[in-house]
């Protein structure tokens, strides 16, 4: 009888030690993975450069439409606003991220009389410095038609 009680106690002790060890190991692995994931996400998606490049391209379209619709007299051809660029610096632990975002608009061949085609390229350079990531661009094509006001037509991502 004494021998069975002793075996039950050893089994319980071993099971408790195994569960405690597995718990500590799981918590340590979870903490490590959480730190690595968040650090990688902060650097890789600093400001979501793809979305910022698309936003910059759309901002270029808005600038063209506003600049030409605010005039009391419409020109024969809509004027293209100059390229625009803006910068922002973010400091993360161990690295400083400099974002440069901007747009550039180019006139393409007219589609039909009174309808003008443009291409706007939004660019986001997510990081300046030691990582060497290149610029990310998004290009949109759109038509502008004349009338009582300039109207945006046929908006598409290239």
Image: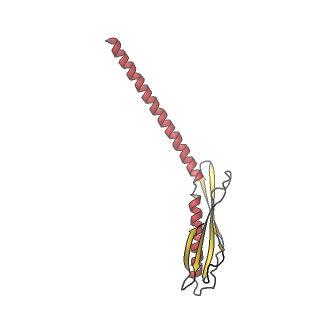
Q: Which of 73 and 89 is in front in this view?
A: 73
Q: How many labels does the image show?
A: 0
Quadrant housing the C terminus: bottom right
Q: With respect to residue 39, does 66 lie above or below?
A: below
* Residue 98 point in image, percent of width and height: 63, 57
Give the residue furthest to the left. 1
Q: Is residue 60 visible?
A: no
Residue 68, located in which quarter of the rendered image? bottom right
**Image color mode:** secondary structure
Q: Nearer the viewer, residue 64 or 119?
A: 119
Question: Which residue is rendered at x = 53% and y = 41% of the image?
Answer: 33
Residue 134 located left or right of residue 20: right
Q: Is residue 61 visible?
A: yes
* Residue 156 point in image, percent of width and height: 57, 69
Q: With respect to residue 133, does 70 lie above or below?
A: below
* Residue 141 point in image, percent of width and height: 60, 71
Give the residue furthest to the front. 112
Residue 82 located left or right of residue 47: right
Quadrant housing the N terminus: top left
Question: Which residue is rendered at x = 42% and y = 29% of the image?
Answer: 19
* Residue 106 point in image, percent of width and height: 66, 73
Question: Which residue is rendered at x = 60% and y = 53% of the image?
Answer: 91
Q: With respect to residue 118, does 88 lie above or below?
A: above
Q: Nearer the viewer, residue 56 or 138?
A: 138
């Amino acid at each position: 009888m004494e021998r069975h009680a002793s075996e039950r106690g050893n089994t319980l002790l071993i099971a408790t030690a195994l569960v405690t060890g597995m718990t500590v190991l799981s918590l340590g692995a979870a903490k490590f993975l959480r730190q690595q994931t968040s650090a990688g996400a902060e650097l890789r998606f600093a400001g979501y450069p793809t979305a910022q490049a698309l936003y910059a391209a759309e901002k270029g379209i808005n600038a063209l439409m506003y600049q030409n619709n605010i005039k009391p007299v419409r020109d024969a051809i809509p004027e293209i606003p100059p390229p625009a660029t803006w910068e922002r610096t973010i400091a993360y632990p161990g690295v400083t991220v400099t974002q440069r975002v901007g747009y550039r608009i180019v006139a393409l061949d007219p589609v039909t009389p009174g309808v003008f085609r443009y291409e706007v390229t939004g660019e986001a350079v997510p990081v300046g410095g030691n990582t060497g990531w290149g610029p990310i661009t998004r290009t949109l094509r759109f038509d502008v038609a004349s009338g009582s006001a300039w109207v945006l037509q046929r908006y598409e991502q290239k």
